[in-house]
Image (cartoon, rainbow, N blue to C red):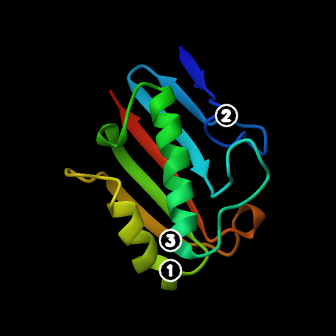
Amino acid sequence: MKQIINTPDAPAPIGPYNQAVISGNMLFISGQIALIPGTSDLSNADTASETHQVMKNLQAILKAAGMDFSHVLKTTIFLSDMSLFAAVNEVYGSYFSADFPARETVAVKGLPKNVNVEISMIASK
């Protein structure tokens, strides 16, 4: 059985999907971009602010599911250009205290709303 997670503290989905789905003790979070919750505005003045907004959106979804970053098992980071790797990595790493999750980072041709960063997560209680 699956449980749908949707919180007003993270951006509403912009397509036919949910913010996250729980199955058993596993949480699958859809890719998040730097949309500011409750608006259609992006927080993308620079790579750091864009990444912080993505991580805040993920944090809100984790919280709605009764979890935090310590529960994250795996992340996938999508970048518009691999030259952004170091800046994104610095911000991303600041949200974890230890026992980092598994991860892959890939550069893609395009992301929703022409953002530079999208991150999805898998977590477990």
* Residue pictured at 45% horizontal, 67% vertical: 105
Badge 3 marks a residue whose secondary structure is helix
**Which residue is farthest top?**
1
Kindly indicate the quadrant of the structure image that contains residue 117.
bottom right
Q: Amino acid at mark 2?
A: Asn
Q: Camera-side residue: 40 or 76?
A: 40
**Number of the front mark, 3 or 2:** 3
Which residue position holds label 2? 18
Q: Residues within 10 Å of mark 1 (few under 14, many from 20)?
A: some
Q: Tell me which label, 2 or 1, sits earlier in the chain.
A: 2
* Residue pictured at 40% horizontal, 62% vertical: 92
Badge 2 marks a residue whose secondary structure is loop
Q: Camera-side residue: 28 or 98?
A: 98
The image shows residue 58, relative to residue 35, as above or below, that is above
**Number of the front mark, 1 or 3:** 3
Q: Tell me which label, 1 or 3, sits earlier in the chain.
A: 3
The label number, if any, that marks residue 84 in the structure image: 1
**Which residue is farthest left?**
98
* Residue pictured at 20% horizontal, 50% vertical: 99
Location of residue 108 in the rendering, given as x and y in whole percent from the top left corner: 61, 72
Which residue position holds label 3? 48
Using residue 86 as the reference point, say whether residue 98 is left or right of it: left
The image shows residue 111, relative to residue 10, as above or below, that is below
Distance between the alpha carbons at the discs numbered 3 and 2: 26 Å
Q: Amino acid at mark 3?
A: Ala
Q: Tell me which label, 3 or 2, sits earlier in the chain.
A: 2
The image shows residue 37, relative to residue 103, as above or below, that is above
